[in-house]
Image (cartoon, rainbow, N blue to C red):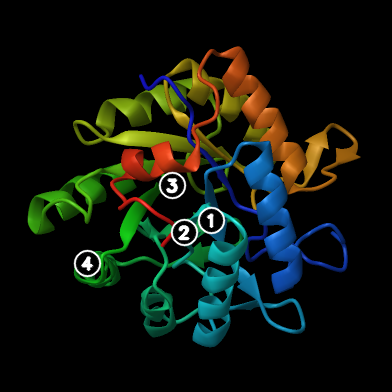
Amino acid sequence: MTAATLITVAPTGAEADKASTPALPVTLDELVAAAVACEAAGAAVIHVHIRDDDARPTLDLGRLKDTVAALRAHTSLIVQLSTGGAVTDPYEARLRVLDAAPDACSLTCGTVNFGDDVFMNPWGFMTDLYQATQEKGVVPEFELFDLGHIAALNRLLATYGPPRGGRIHCDLVMGVPGGFGGDLPTVAAALRALPEGATWSATGIGRTSVPVLLAALAAGGHLRVGMEDTLTFAKGRPVRDNAELVTRAAAAATLAQRPPMDTATARAFLGLPTGNG
C-alpha cells in the first residue's frame, strides 16, 4: 500500500450532454479551467475526452494536440488521453490519439456491453494499440470493465512484455451496466486476478461512485472521479463542478491517512519521466 493516493479526474467523457449539464467542461477554455481547479484540489492526472464546436465527442487530432499543449501550459497534471472516444469511433481514429503525444492513454482490455451500446475492443485492436504505446513512449492505463478483461491483460503482458516505464497501472471501471458491479466483493475478486505487482485505481459510475471510492481506499487502491463518471454529488443534488468531486476524494484519502499524491510523485509512480511532458 502506498503512502499517498493517486487521484485522476475525468472531467468530460463522451456521454453527458452539455445542454442538460451546463457545468460540463466541453470547450478548451472550460477544460483548462477545470484542470487548474482540479489540480489545486488534489488531482495529479487528467483523463481527457474532447468535444467539437457543437459539444459532440471528437477525436480530431488537431484539437487533441491543442488540448495537450494547453493543459501542459497551464498545469503540471499528467495528461492521459482517452483512446476509447465514443463507442462509435473507428479503430483508426482511436489509434491516432497517440500522435497527440500525451503522457499516458487509456487502453481498454476487451469489449463490453456499455448500457445499451457495445464498446468494441477486440484483441487485434488491443495489441495494435499496446505496441504503439511501447513504440511512442506513451504510458498506458489498462481499463478493466470485467474479470475477462483482466485475463486479456495478463495475456497481453505475457505476449508483448511490460509497458513503457515498466509500471502496470490499471483502472477498475465499476458500475457500468454490462460490466463489474460497484461493490466490495467485486473489488476483492478483481484484485485477486490482477497481474503481480500491478497498481490500481477504481472508478465508480453513477450511484456507485462513493461506495467504490471508499472500497478502493480501504483496499489500498487509488481513485478516479469526475463528471465523466457521475453527475450527482448526493441524492437529489447535482455535481457543482469537477473540483467538487476531487475535493471529496482528496478529503477521503486524507482521512484514510493516504493524502493526495503530487504530480512529481505521480510521474515516478506511473513510470513517467520527470518534468511536464
Q: How far apart are marks 2 and 3 (CA)?
A: 18 Å
Please tell me which of labels 1 and 3 falls first in the chain: 1
Q: In which quarter of the image is the N terminus?
A: top left
Give SS at disc 3: loop
The answer to whether the residue labelled 1 contacts the one labelled 4, judged by CB atoms less than 8 Å apart, is: no
Q: How far apart are marks 1 and 4 (CA)?
A: 21 Å
**Residue furthest out toward the right:** 236
Of the residues tagged 3 and 4, which is closer to the observer? 4
Name the residue at 53% across, 56% down: 47
Quick check: 79 above or below 91? above
Name the residue at 60% across, 18% down: 254
The answer to whether the residue labelled 2 contacts the one labelled 1, judged by CB atoms less than 8 Å apart, is: yes
Quick check: 179 above or below 207? below
Q: Distance between the residues labelled 1 and 3?
A: 17 Å
**Of the residues shown, which amino acid type is indicated by label 3?**
Phe
Please tell me which of labels 2 and 1 falls first in the chain: 1
| Position of residue 276 measured from the top left corner of the image (x, y, whole percent) | 44, 57
The answer to whether the residue labelled 3 contacts the one labelled 4, judged by CB atoms less than 8 Å apart, is: no
Name the mark on residue 138: none
| Left or right side of 167 for 22 | right
**Of the residues shown, which amino acid type is indicated by label 2?**
Gln
**Which residue corresponds to mark 2?**
80
**Which residue corresponds to mark 1?**
47
**Which residue corresponds to mark 4?**
127
The answer to whether the residue labelled 1 contacts the one labelled 3, judged by CB atoms less than 8 Å apart, is: no
Name the mark on residue 145: 3
Please tell me which of labels 3 and 4 falls first in the chain: 4
**Of the residues shown, which amino acid type is indicated by label 4?**
Thr
Please tell me which of labels 4 and 2 falls first in the chain: 2
Quick check: 218 above or below 120? above
